[in-house]
Image: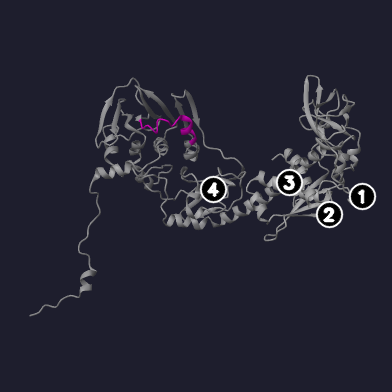
Amino acid sequence: MNKKRKPVNQLKSGPVSSGRLRIGDNWNAITIIALSQSNPLKAIAEFVENSIDAGAKNITIIRGKEKGENFLRIIDDGEGIRMDESGVPDFKYVATHICDSIKRQLKKDGAGGIQGEFGIGLLSFWTVGEHISVLSSGRDGRTYQMQMAKGDPGYSIKQKRTLIPVSGTELTISPLLPGVSHINGEKIQRYLASELRDRIRKSDIVLRITDRTARKELLVEPREFAGRLLHRLPVVSTDRGEVYTELYLNEVSRENTIGVYRAGTRVLSSITELDMFSSEPWASGWLQGIIDIPFLNLTPGTRSGIIHDENFTEFIESVIPLETKLNEIISEQRKAEEERASHKILKSVQNALKEAILALPKDEYDWFDIHLDSRRKPGSTAGSFDAQSGEETERPMGMTSDEDQSEQKEFFEFAGPLFSVKVSPASAVVSVGKSRTFRAMPRDQRRRLVEEGLIFHWEIKEGDGTLENPSGEIVTFMAANDPGLTTLSLSVSQGDAVCTAEGLVTVTDSIIPKYDESSVESKGMPGYTFRRAPGELWRSQYDDKQNVIIINNGHRDFVYASKSRAGKLRYICRLFSKELVYRNFPGLPADQLLERMIELNLYTEDNLKS
């Protein structure tokens, strides 16, 4: 009689056998757990947290050397090791209940302010040193000691003779590993100030570091953030709890980061380490601060990784309104910074051009009316800047307002002591046998003209020619009958202060033709504004009616130059030189315009300050 066979797929549907996972090699598992903490500073932070969890109010970290070996000791005044029924510290429970922390049960019973929960923190000493010794006192006032060694499955417990019983717990690790022995007290201080920022602040503990090697005592205080604290941000709330946010708007920098914390302890130094937060606003560089998520689940070994479970997913969804608000704040801040930067760039370029033109021949660059305004305080401008348009509204540089016409000077208008001097023009071209005047421009440290108590001395340092009135502020140079290069030397003294400068005179028998002065209207120094025109080849244009230079901020050269503030400043300065030379010398052939542009660029960039 044939038996009815079951279909093959039916045989495969049921499990052949079942059971429960278990560890095949306990010591191998302990080794993996002990070495899972790769950061020795994180291990030190966990030891400090154990003291905080034990109710300590005073914790001292001592770094030093005994018997030729570096050690690290942590002393606290907390409750010490939990005692057994006989009143002795239950070190045996600590050593035989790895991965079975009593703190997990305390959390289930409603205890708050406790961080550890895996029962593996003590094993992290493997990443710090070779041996660990833990002291704690019993009810009888005697001190007991537990010792363990790295790589050794055994432990020992014995009574320790001490003159005074240990009030809390004393943990010593020695000798330190070679890489750890170089971690000084200041580095530990900085790390703990950030790592345990809110735990230190909320538990109201005093955490000190005594670095005997460096002979320093340091106090660990919760890290303070720079910038403006952002108020009225959207509340990040979930069914699992509320997320605490403390964010600051600071000057943009790569150093600005937002740390991720859980219950006051830092998990990640920057939230951008998580892929979903690697974009703005988190990676903008404008923000620093903390986001504390108390319901996160962490990886047990390192406690510096986040488990991407339902709790984490709920946090991501709840933080979207905060992201939107932060992006709005950053956008407004960027706009304000661009306006301030445009204002600073305009002032820098204008001041540099004014200094250059004062150093260049007056009769060749008087279209700008700079020389007519030499009585104005150096470095000042003749108009107001429109932050929204990037333009400066100017009045002619030779004109003055009612306030400027006032004979009474304010205190800050009086010049200080002599600080520097320049020759104006610093370079000039003179025909053979002709003359030219040069002026000394002595200034104080704030670039104001100095007029009192000055002694001038001019002389010809190199070359041919003669000087008239060599002891005056203004000197007349008479060129020789042969072409050549002459160097004028100027010395100005005021009491004990002495400043020197030089001027160059090119004596030639041919002069570049001058432009027709009547064809160009005198104008003040222009401002600038932006017009975005990507794909178009023009870099800048001059608006004669508004007296502004329009810069194409969509041009590839502008984008390239804007990678740094100094590059952007130089680029805009060169555009100014191009437009001003082109307008100041109408009708000159291209080669002569290029010569003038090089001339103006040379003297302008020498005075350019970023």
Question: Magenta segment range?
Answer: 176-190
Query: Label 2's element?
Result: loop
Which one is earlier in the sequence, the residue at label 1 or at label 4?
Answer: 4
* Label 1 Cα neighbours within 10 Å, binned few <14 / some 14-19 / many ≥20: few
Foreground residue among 288 and 550: 550
- Pointer 3: what residue? 573
Residue 62 visible to the viewer: yes
Are the two marked residues, 1 and 4, in contact with CB atoms closer than 8 angstroms?
Answer: no
Could you tell which of marks 3 and 1 lies nearer the N-terminus?
1
- How many other residues sit within 10 Å of disc 3, few (<14), some (14-19) or many (≥20)? many
> What residue sits right under mark 1 in the picture?
518
Q: CA distance from mark 2 to mark 1?
A: 16 Å
Residue 146 appears at what percent x and percent y? 29, 31
Question: Left or right of 217: which side holds 251?
Answer: right
From the viewer's perspective, is 349 left or right of 13? right
> Element at badge 1?
helix
Q: Which mark is residue 544?
A: 2
**Number of marks in the rendered image:** 4
Question: Mark 3 and mark 4: span between their CA atoms?
Answer: 44 Å
Q: Give the residue type that dot 1 points to.
A: Ser
Q: Earlier in the sequence, mark 2 or mark 1?
A: 1
Spatial CA span between label 2 and label 4: 52 Å
**Does 184 appear in magenta?**
yes
Residue 473 visible in image? no
The residue lying furthest to the left in this view is: 1
Q: State which mark lies toward you, 2 or 1.
A: 1
Amino acid type shown at disc 4: Thr
Quadrant of the frame with the N terminus: bottom left
